[in-house]
Image (cartoon, grey):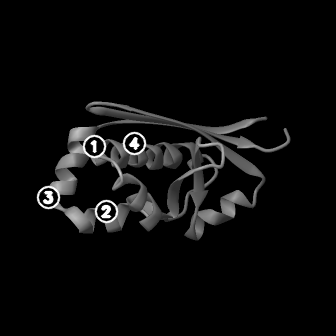
Amino acid sequence: MDVLGVGIDIIRVSRIERLLKEKGKRFKERIFTEAECNYCERFKHRAEHYAVRFAAKEAVRKAISPIFKGYYNYKDIEVVRQEDGMPGIRLHGTLSKIETQGVMFNVSLTHEHDYAVAIVLLQKNGS
């Protein structure tokens, strides 16, 4: 498969933890889908889960930049759990047309205490 774009992002979990405390519901509603919030809220250390999803959204933004220049918001990029338990990306809004172009995302997420990292490859299907 041909790689069309790659994105990587690292973020301090403490930054997201601070935003969750200071902005709370407003921050979550602006950045995350309802399903993402439901997932993250299940955990004791929820800031780690929000942080890695934020990093994934940034990594997707970087990966799609060679093929998409239009406007979108963070909620148009959703981190999902695939049937096999691995992370995946689902696009909404103006970004959804990317998925009709025969592409796929490969995603790797990790978080450890105060850091969350995401890497995303955007690949052409069937190449």
Residue occupying the point 34% across, 66% down: 30
- Label 1 and label 3: CA atoms lie apart by 17 Å
What is the three-letter code of the residue carrying label 3?
Glu
Q: Picture quarter containing residue 127? A: top right
Q: Which residue is mark 1?
A: 45
Circle 4 sits in a helix, a strand or a loop, which is it?
A: helix
Relative depth, front residue between 50 and 101: 50
Q: Earlier in the sequence, mark 4 or mark 2?
A: 2
| Badge nearest the viewer, 4 or 1 | 1
Q: Earlier in the sequence, mark 1 or mark 3?
A: 3
What is the three-letter code of the residue carrying label 1?
His
Q: Position of residue 61 (x, y in %)?
A: 50, 49
Relative depth, front residue between 7 and 75: 75
Q: Position of residue 33 (x, y in %)?
A: 44, 64
Q: Earlier in the sequence, mark 4 or mark 3?
A: 3
Q: Image height check: is 115 above or below 25?
A: above
Relative side of 1 to 63, left or right:
right
Mark 4 vs 1: CB contact within 8 A = no
- Label 4 and label 2: CA atoms lie apart by 14 Å
Mark 4 vs 3: CB contact within 8 A = no
What is the three-letter code of the residue carrying label 2?
Lys
- The quadrant of the rendering that contains the N terminus is top right
Q: Which residue is mark 4?
A: 52
Relative side of 13 to 31, left or right:
left
Which of the labelled discs sits on residue 28, or is there none?
2
Callout 1 environment at 10 Å: few (<14), some (14 to 19), or many (20+)?
few
What is the three-letter code of the residue carrying label 4?
Val
Residue occupying the point 25% across, 47% down: 16
Q: Picture quarter containing residue 106? A: top right
Q: Earlier in the sequence, mark 2 or mark 3?
A: 3
